[in-house]
Image (cartoon, rainbow, N blue to C red):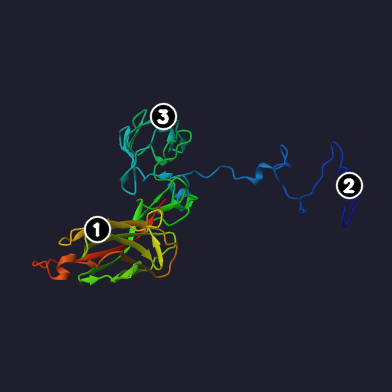
Amino acid sequence: MSKIEVDAIVPQSGTTLTVGEAGDTVDISNATLSANLNANNLTSGTIPDARFPATLPAVDGSNLTNVQIAGGYTACDAITVTNTDTFALTAGGSPVSPESANNCIVSLNGVIQAPGNSYTISGSNIVFSTALTAGSDVIDFITVLGTALNVGTVSDGTIGIAKLSATGTKDSTTFLRGDNTFAEAGGGKVLQVVSTNITAITASTTTQSFLDISGFSVSITPSSASNKILVLATFNVGSTSTSGNNYIRLVRDSTAINIGDANGSNARASWYQRGVNTNTMYAGSINFLDSPATTSSTTYKLQWYRNDGTFYLNRPGAFAGGSESEGATATSTITVMEIAIWV
């Protein structure tokens, strides 16, 4: 027998290398194959049976430990066989109730059982078609394959927050909105409240123009430029003249807000009164939801204007002239609230 020793045989691209002919025996037992075997180059009979063990290892509970199983699968506790057909299913000592027999893999005496024929499920019990025999039969393992799903339906409690694409912060104060974001519940929230109570008796000047009411202002610093400021003002005023016009307006810093439309040469105000009883105090109020659009300190105040006589805060006008004996007085208040509004 002749031998040929070569370092390498490189077939021309696109050709087939043939070693031996029909009836020849080719021995490559001492050779090392460098080609990678995959599903595309394996054909029938290319791997000898000697490459496999004579028998495959049995699958039991010990083979399934430390195996990560997705989908909420449950390996039931080991069951000691007694002379009966019904056995309780537990996991970690707690009852397990499979959706159906088809949701279980049951191995008995090394053989996988047919669901519905070999066994059925009743609540948290497995019922075999025939009674088992203690000492002869062995339940190798029972695995419950989660809960059966309808098409398009996910089992309860199986989707965590990490699987959602929602943005925002999930906590006890937020909920998931329709636009897939977490937001605080409710249509609005009061973030801060600032109030000033005026008890002093204050008189207006004779200047016929809007002037600040002394001490009747309050400042607030919004936490967000998108938040609103709710202004609530109540006041008690009197006049020394039964004729003329009484005006009060709301001002943010130096800008008049919540005032009426122009009407000729008349003053524009938030509150107006004409023709008063000099022995009487008149209660007025202004409520306005403002949008300052700032995070800087903002001052809200009231200004007044009277074109005849003197305007008084917290007492009637006649008492100021000494003709009112009862000497009635009152208080006035201005309160501002920062409101966070969810839209």
User: In terms of depth relative to the viewer, which is nearer, 105 or 329?
Assistant: 329
Q: Residue at x 70, y 45 (%)?
A: 38
* CB within 8 Å, label 1 to label 2: no
Alpha carbon distance from label 2 to label 3: 58 Å
Measured from the top left, where is residue 168 in percent x and y?
45, 56
The mark found on residue 118 in the picture is 3
In the image, taking residue 157 as reference, residue 243 lies left or right, namely left
Q: Residue at x 50, y 50 (%)?
A: 165
Question: SS class of the residue under badge 2?
Answer: loop
Measured from the top left, where is residue 317 in percent x and y?
19, 66
The residue at which mark 1 appears reads as 284
Quick check: 279 above or below 74?
Answer: below
Quick check: 7 above or below 208?
Answer: above
For this orientation, the residue located farthest to the left is: 325
Q: How many marks?
A: 3
Mark 3: which amino acid? Ser
Question: SS class of the residue under badge 1?
Answer: strand
Q: Residue at x 72, y 47 (%)?
A: 37
Q: Earlier in the sequence, mark 1 or mark 3?
A: 3
In the image, taking residue 154 as reference, residue 4 lies left or right, namely right
Q: Kindly tell me whether residue 330 is visible in this rendering.
A: no
Question: SS class of the residue under badge 3?
Answer: loop
Mark 2: which amino acid? Ser
Mark 1: which amino acid? Gly
Viewer-nearest of discs 1 and 2: 1
Viewer-nearest of discs 2 and 3: 2
The mark found on residue 13 in the picture is 2
